[in-house]
Amino acid sequence: MLNTIYSEFLKLKKTYIIPVVFICGILMTIFMFLARFITEHDMPFEKYAYNIEQVNFLMLYTVLFSITAAYIFSREVTDITTNILYTYPISRLKIFISKLITLYIVIFFTYAIETLSIPLSYYFLNGIFPEGSLIIKDIRANGYSLFFQFLLTPIPILVANISKNLIIPSSYGILAFILSSLLVNNDLGNLKYIPLTSPYLSSAYFYNLKDINLKYVLTSGILCFILFLFIGMYHFIQQDIN
């Protein structure tokens, strides 16, 4: 399985995915840094970090990881190399798990870049590092968001397996971002706890900016993961290679 994961990264190395992931990991940090630098407006670290992460978790990452999942899981179909993939001496289940682990590593890498860039940019902006307790709090918020991002990945994976292209998963990412933004920015009661909002809500919970029941977020995320992972895995194993 390690060889299969390695081969997936070799495929990614030949594409735009890796540089795009790096850019998206620091993109909103750069925008926030420039905005604060130009206006010379002081901002507490918590608000600074939250503003960056709100855009990332609700909008940017939803689209980015949908496209990444689509590429990892449907590349062989679009390149017409599926027959070659399935000649490997490894089961389809292990191929699915290898692709899933590859996607998780890419997502982790993106979050790591963001988590490092925020306090560093704050230091260059203000000349001082945030307090250690604030950095730890931000790391915990990102950790929870990362966990729920992992739980959501079976949705774009299933969309990619069914559509066998990049366009529909990309459209899913855009629609998911629009829907989740509407739900968290309007008083719609428990509707805000749909799984699509969980990466953002779990991080906002740590900043105490919204009245959030973390148990609802966790329950919806886990149920979503189990349902879509089972369906996606079954579809991947049973799909026709032609």
Image (cartoon, rainbow, N blue to C red):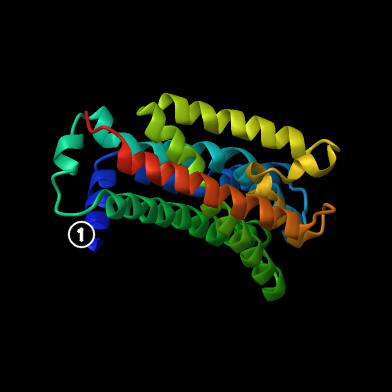
Figure check: 223 above or below 164? below
In the image, what residue occupies the spot 77% across and 40% down? 191
Q: Give, as a three-letter code, the residue at label 1.
A: Asn
Quadrant for the C terminus in the image: top left
Q: Callout 1: few (<14), some (14-19), or many (20+) C-alpha neighbours within 10 Å?
A: few
Q: Depth check: 143 or 193 in front?
A: 193
Looking at the picture, how far across and down is residue 235, in whole percent?
38, 39
* Res. 138 in view: yes
Q: Depth check: 85 or 175 in front?
A: 85
Q: Residue furthest bottom?
A: 132
Looking at the picture, how far across and down is residue 82, in whole percent?
20, 36
Figure check: 240 above or below 109? above
Q: In this view, does 165 lie to the left or right of 135?
A: left
Quadrant for the N terminus in the image: bottom left
Looking at the picture, how far across and down is residue 117, in whole percent?
54, 57
The residue that disc 1 covers is 3
In the image, what residue occupies the spot 32% across and 35% down? 74
In the image, what residue occupies the spot 51% across and 26% down? 171
Q: Is residue 178 left or right of residue 21?
A: right
* Res. 68 in view: no
Q: In this view, does 160 lie to the left or right of 48?
A: left
Looking at the picture, how far across and down is residue 207, in whole percent?
77, 59
Give the quarter of the image for residue 87. top left
